[in-house]
Image (cartoon, helix red, strand yellow):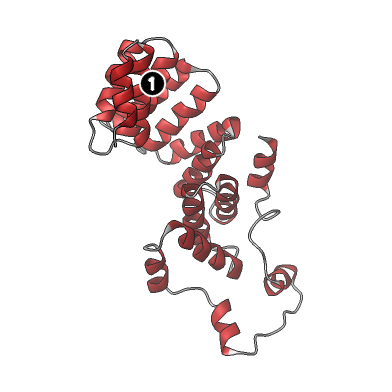
Amino acid sequence: GKKSEASAKNPTANGAPVSPGIKNAVTGTSAVKATTAEEIAAAKPASAKERQAARSLDLINQASFWMGELQKNPADAEAALEGSVALRKIGSAERAVQLAAMGLQVKGESPQLWSALALGLVAGCENEPALQALQKAIYLSPKDASLQSALGVGYDRLERPDLAATAYEAGLKLSPEDATILSNYGLSIAMTGDLKRAEEMLRRAYHSPLAPPQARQNLALVVGLQGRFEESERLATRD
């Protein structure tokens, strides 16, 4: 937890490689001038058209593109945000947190960057820092149901099902049939021992067209815990 907090406060400590030219620019010393067209092009930020095209790349190449933009300009808040989201989705939670924190050094009240920071911390299981960041993100984006769901997950990890339930209920008020919230909430209820209510919640999630894979897995688990093993196995192995 402490390591990620430090990373969030000082994201450039272990951040993207910074070229000597950028380091010199930051310290105020002279940089060696680019002498070739290739070097000039490499140091120039991507155009709006190029950035839009990058959003259609696979996530690994998106992350690489935005990290390259940050190397050119560490104060590029858009690149920090886009890179953070891509990195989190490919499983690089710690790096995602670092990029979001870099962006917040430039745009300290950005709802999107606070959300990216918070969700990166949740993904990295940095629970207490995540809760702090989520509270700020929710304050800035009070209608974002996914943040309430993430807050519920954080409280569940800290074994506070009462606070988790409050967060999930808030999320469902914003998005009543959100399959991810229903799935997370159902598993949370199951951990309190109320398997019947948990199953009802998880079936709502499972039958949603946007149900995440975890919804089926969680439903199979809860059905199995009630002794219906054949049904549980069918759910668990269904494509």
Quarter of the image with the C terminus in it: top left
* Viewer-side residue, 133 vs 120: 120
Q: Position of 176 compared to 6: left or right?
A: left
**Residue 142 seen in the current view:** no
Residue at point 34%, 23% (across, down)? 220
**Residue 177 seen in the current view:** yes
Residue at point 65%, 51% (across, down)? 11
Count of picture labels: 1
Which residue type does callout 1 highlight?
Leu
Is residue 16 shown above or below 200?
Answer: below
What residue would you read off at disc 1? 221
Quarter of the image with the N terminus in it: top right
Is residue 188 shown above or below 139?
Answer: above
* Viewer-side residue, 149 vs 61: 61
| Helix, strand or loop status at disc 1 | helix
Position of residue 200 measured from the top left corner of the image (x, y, whole percent): 27, 18
Quadrant hosting residue 234? top left
User: What is the crowding at mark 1: few (fewer than 14 residues within 10 Å), some, or many (at least 20)?
Assistant: many
Residue at point 57%, 53% (across, down)? 99
Q: Position of 206 compared to 161: left or right?
A: left
Is residue 155 shown above or below 100?
Answer: above
Position of residue 59 measured from the top left corner of the image (x, y, whole percent): 44, 57
Position of residue 124 measured from the top left corner of the image (x, y, whole percent): 56, 39
Q: Position of 95 compared to 206: left or right?
A: right
* Viewer-side residue, 23 vs 206: 206
Quadrant hosting residue 4? top right
Q: Position of 129 compared to 196: left or right?
A: right
